Image (cartoon, helix red, strand yellow):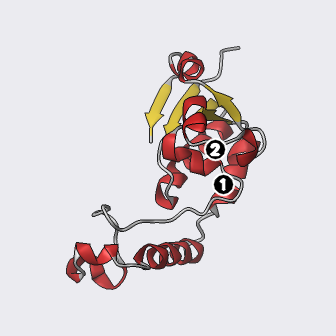
């Protein structure tokens, strides 16, 4: 019997829109029989928090489609106005619900249940004064060298 394929993902972003890709890809690969590990570093650690408050930021995200064609007439500087991030996050969450997109916390749990290993970067945990108790159950804390051992043998490696 051959060894399963391996998928290695490095997740570095901590916003709502950047939270979905690593979990979608990891859960799908795990369901297909891949051995999967996600290494969460820097702001990606937010995705492992017990109750994350992830936001979508329109500022610096020129590809973000905005409601009512705002991306065509609303000045980019306007996205920096107080309250815009909360408003855009609420609008994105509503759109996701309306379109039947799975809730992020549910997707994260499905990823865990499918057998993907979630690894918090030890250096970043220390840098931001996190503690293992800040993260969901089964979160491993490991260094880059440990993850690179796996990634070096992976069939697919992604940096998200």
Q: Is residue 95 above or below residue 130?
A: below
Measured as percent of width and height from the top left, residue 29 is found at 60, 38
Quadrant in which residue 39 is drawn: top right
Q: Is residue 59 above or below residue 160?
A: below
Quadrant in which residue 51 is drawn: bottom right
Front-most of residues 87 and 92: 87
Measured as percent of width and height from the top left, residue 155 is found at 51, 23
Question: Image point 71% across, 14% down: which residue?
Answer: 1
Q: How many marks?
A: 2
- Circles 1, 2 touching at the beta carbon (< 8 Å): yes
Question: Image point 53% across, 16% down: which residue?
Answer: 153
34 sits left or right of 136 in the view: left
Measured as percent of width and height from the top left, residue 134 is found at 71, 47
80 sits left or right of 18 in the view: left
Label 2 sits on residue:
27
74 sits left or right of 30 in the view: left
Front-most of residues 6 and 131: 131
Q: State the SS at label 2.
A: helix
Whether residue 34 is visible here, answered yes or no, is no
Label 1 sits on residue:
107
């Amino acid at each position: 019997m051959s060894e399963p394929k391996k998928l290695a993902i490095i997740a570095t972003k901590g916003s709502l829109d950047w939270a979905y890709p690593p979990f979608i890809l990891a859960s799908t690969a795990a369901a297909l029989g891949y051995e999967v590990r996600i290494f969460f570093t820097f702001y990606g650690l937010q995705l492992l928090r017990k109750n994350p408050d992830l936001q979508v930021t329109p500022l610096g995200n020129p590809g973000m489609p905005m409601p009512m064609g705002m991306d065509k007439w609303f000045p980019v500087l306007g996205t920096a106005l107080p309250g815009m991030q909360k408003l855009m996050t609420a609008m994105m969450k509503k759109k996701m619900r309306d379109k039947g997109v799975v809730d992020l916390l549910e997707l994260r749990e499905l990823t865990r249940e499918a057998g993907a290993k979630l690894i918090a970067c030890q250096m970043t945990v220390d840098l931001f004064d996190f503690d293992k108790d800040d993260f969901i159950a089964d979160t491993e804390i490991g260094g880059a060298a440990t993850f690179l051992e796996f990634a070096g043998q992976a069939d697919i490696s992604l940096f998200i």
